[in-house]
Image (cartoon, grey):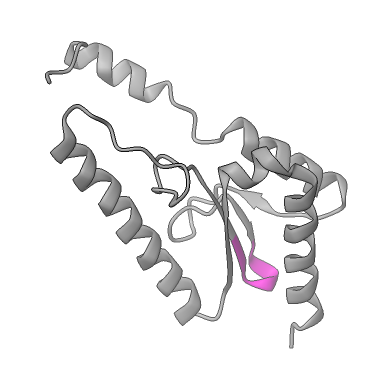
Amino acid sequence: MADNMSKLDRTKTMKAIRSQSRLENLLTKRLWHRGYRFRKNANSLFGKPDISIRKYKIVIFIDSCFWHVCPIHSTWPKSNREYWENKLLRNQQRDNEVNEHYIKNGWHIKRIWEHEIKKDLIGVVEDVSSFIDNVKKNKP
């Protein structure tokens, strides 16, 4: 099926997509209020992690169910199927490359699905807080 929009309109629409989601902002505000200090969407780090703490070599990614192909909630678009399969599979491949990069370089990595935040924001805040605290506690 062909795109319903002109190339110019599609470009405009895609540019309007924000790099930070509402769920990401909910989580980071809660963490910030708990006293955790971090950078959001650090361009200088590989894969542009959603949350990063260089001092402790921590990166946290918040993965959307659609773009990162959640095993529970992901759906495949019905139109232009070949394009979307290639696109979404490449996203998964890139996630694996990012994970390998950080693990190989001694970083602590955590990935969170968007549905986890939707289902239990407080639980995710607790989980991320514990993750950060454990890394800090075990820092040489």
The answer to whether 55 appears left or right of 50 in the picture is: right
- Quarter of the image where one finds residue 95: bottom left
Residue found at the very far front of the displayed protein: 72
The answer to whether 125 appears left or right of 64 in the picture is: right
x then y, percent, for residue 101: 42, 72
Residue found at the very far bottom of the displayed protein: 140
The answer to whether 31 appears left or right of 5 in the picture is: right
Q: Say above or below: 13 vs 76.
A: above
Answer whether residue 119 is magenta in the image: no
Magenta highlight range: 53-59
The structure residue drawn at horizontal position 41% and vertical position 39%, both measured from the top left corner, is: 66
Q: Say above or below: 91 vs 130.
A: above
Quadrant, the N terminus = top left
In depth, the one of 45 and 116 nearer the eye is 116
In depth, the one of 17 and 68 nearer the eye is 68
The structure residue drawn at horizontal position 44% and vertical position 26%, both measured from the top left corner, is: 17
Q: Say above or below: 128 vs 103.
A: above
Q: Say above or below: 88 vs 4.
A: below
x then y, percent, for residue 21: 57, 33
The structure residue drawn at horizontal position 17% and vertical position 35%, both measured from the top left corner, is: 81
x then y, percent, for residue 125: 77, 51
Quadrant, the C terminus = bottom right
Q: How many numbered marks, from 0 up?
A: 0
- Quarter of the image where one finds residue 5: top left
Answer whether residue 55 is magenta in the image: yes
x then y, percent, for residue 52: 62, 58
- Quarter of the image where one finds residue 79: top left
